[in-house]
Amino acid sequence: MINAAGKQDTHLGKIAAQEAGISAFLPYSHMVNDTTVKTKDGYFMQVIKIEGLSFETESNETLSVRKNIRAILLRGMADARLAIYHHIIRRRVTGRQEGHFENSWCQALDNAYQDSLEQSHLFVNEQYITIIRRPARHKIGMIAALANVCHSKLDDKAAAFQETDNLRTLHDASRHLIRALADYQPRLLGLSRKDGITVSEPLAFFSHLTNFEDSPVRLPEMSLAAYLPRKRISFGHESFEIRGAQSDDLKFGAVLSIKEYADHTAPGMMDALLRLPHEFIISQSFAFTDRQSAMGALNETQRKIAASEQGAASLIEELDIARDDLASGRSSFGEHHITITPIASDIHGLNHAVSACTGALINLGIISVREDMNMEAAYWASHPGNLHFIARRALISNQNFAGFASLHTFPCGKEIDNHWGQAITRLETTSGTPYWFNFHERDVGNFTVIGPTGTGKTVLLTFLLAQAQRLSPRAIYFDKDRGAEIFIRAIGGTYTILKSGRPTNLNPLAIADTPANRSFLKQWVKVLLTSDAAFPLSPQEEEIINDAINANFETSQPNRKLSHLATLLAGYSTGSSVRLEDRIAKWHGNGAKAWLFDNAHDTLNLDNPTIGFDLTSVLDDPESRTPWLMYIFHRISQSLDGEKTIIMLDEGWKLLDDPVFSVKLKDWLKTIRKQNGIIGFATQSASDALNAKIGDTIIEQSPTQIFLPNPKAAVQEYCHGFGLTPKELAVIKELNPASRCFLVKHGNDSVIARLDLSALAQFMPVLSGRTENIKVMEELMQEYGEEPALWLRRFIERTVS
């Protein structure tokens, strides 16, 4: 009799049977609730995503303290029925930052910049902690299980009671961990909405471990072990492959395990791996053991070492200390395992990644082995709950695990849902990770930029303003030495050069008649008349000025200027030795300062979304600077209507030294956020910032601080003044000015970023604002016109070498 061929007898049928077998190795059974997964072995699990702690600029002492705190947390959680998995998923990020730019030059810059980032191979490090509650394994638990079998009527009640108890214990452990790790920004994963569909965040994490890709996962109506796999996994001798439905959906992996641990565990044992330019998954588990079992294991280890008689003295001493710590409750112990799974798109890349990971471990004093016979088991052991697959495990203390699972990270900023929406730009860090840069921390967006000449301060400022155009803000730039002029004109902005002796076409007395304007002009004229501090105004003179301002608004528009106001003041007699008409003489007619405000019309127009003013000629002339700043900022203040606005003050600390303007700006800094505006301050000297009259207020009200390289940076200024750590100061001093790297402090973030525009040579003449290029721009505008469309292309052709 001939038997009919079964499906499994065909070649493809054997493959299908193998694929179906994947579910047998995955531990996941079903979702108990939105945040909890139950395994086939009756384990209950919850997953916590950890943003991590910025460590790159922290001192070793601070990191040691953090490690000790984590160790204490673990000791407090010690329960033989609890286990912890810690995963680091390092994956390459691709894709472009979204954004539409009204200005074509800004759009072209962004396109070129996004292209350059795609060539940089940026990676992110994502961290997860899985807490596992295991069923009881002691004799009472076995008896209870037997009783449940014998007494079926009690089975359901007992199971429900046990499940409720396990869920409560797991929930308490998760809540305690989240509260204790608040500085690491933990978040319990649950359900979320994506494109209008409810998806499970814990299942998306387990899916990534299974399929090696990010994708949303809906809640299934079947076993999770059968539902999660979407790709075929095939194991070879020392590597495996994950193959998807598409021909190009193919990845290769290998598994590295620890063969020999290091002599000691320092804070951040695995941090060196977080910089490697490769994708990988680090998986480690720590299953708490009870004190009796741990003591027995330590005693057995000590007995074996003593019997070997090789280097026994120091090891036995260390074991004596460990036993004493365990007995006194100063330490807890658990069974630990760790694997590193490098991932690549081809075997050559995989071998390169394996070598890089192995080398990094050797530098840490860790001897690793590339699994071959044990590779499949080691791979399955990386899935939370698959503790029985662990082949290489070691008994370590809570202090040791606190070193392995440091939860350190490189800050990545915030891509979306910021105060102004999406991030301003995406920067590259020195660790090869992206950093989403924002001015705002919650609703406060003021910022400071400190950097000596030659470190790229102007390029950084203009680049950030160009990238900010994706959000369509207004930008008002108070410039020095015309550094930003080319950029402002190139994007269609207006630029005014304040030059001593040349009429400014400003006439504050011609502004509209409103109570606010009347109040301002009264104060403003008093500043004009007291520019010579030796002659303060009397109460009677102040009242005369008030009357003269009121009379100014009753005259016809052509008469509303300083020359006419002088005649009004001349009609009053105060009996003072210095008459009011004499005080105001310098500000009108043939007076030395008449060029500033004694003009027939006021042509100040703040309607253009980008406006620049060059203040070089008045920065060191307080007599001219103060009333000019008062008027311009009064007009700006009146124009703020809730629209996004960036006000940039280059060498702004000189402006803050102004005794009149600084007082008004101090109040404005605290209220501009209510009008959706931000202020940026840039200077070459940190001491100038600290010595300014309201320097402390600026620093306090600026959540974002950027420091460019400075080998002469001083402790007094950077640490005591700006609050930097000694490690952050060392970074600033050691960075090469030519590296285009800088330190960004934003909220709790402290990151070393890089702005590499070497591939964007055609944009640099516009961003940098060199003196020779300004002359080229002037020649072209004079010949072809001031519209960017008429001169910008020719300018780039002439200046790009």
Image (cartoon, rainbow, N blue to C red):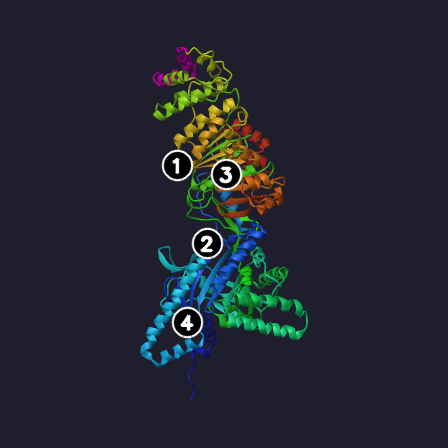
Q: Amino acid at mark 2?
A: Ala
Q: Amino acid at mark 4?
A: Gly
Q: Earlier in the sequence, mark 4 or mark 1?
A: 4
Whole-number angstrom distance, CA of label 1 to CA of label 3 = 20 Å
Q: Which mark is residue 182?
A: 2
Please state which of the two labelled residues, at mark 4 or mark 2, is closer to the viewer. 2
In front of the other: 398 or 705: 398
Whole-number angstrom distance, CA of label 4 to CA of label 1 = 56 Å
Q: Which residue is mark 4?
A: 42
Taking the image as shown, residue 10 lies to the left or right of residue 150, namely right
In front of the other: 32 or 132: 132
Please state which of the two labelled residues, at mark 2 or mark 1, is closer to the viewer. 2
Q: Which residue is mark 3?
A: 699
Query: Residue 376 location in percent, x, y?
Result: 53, 71
Q: Earlier in the sequence, mark 2 or mark 1?
A: 2
Q: Which mark is residue 143?
A: none
Q: Earlier in the sequence, mark 4 or mark 2?
A: 4
Taking the image as shown, residue 731 lies to the left or right of residue 658, namely right
What kind of element bears circle 2?
Answer: helix
Query: Residue 191 location in percent, x, y?
Result: 38, 59
Other-residue count near label 2 (Cα within 10 Å), few / some / many at <14 / 14–19 / ≥20: few
Instruction: Give the magenta range.
Output: 549-573
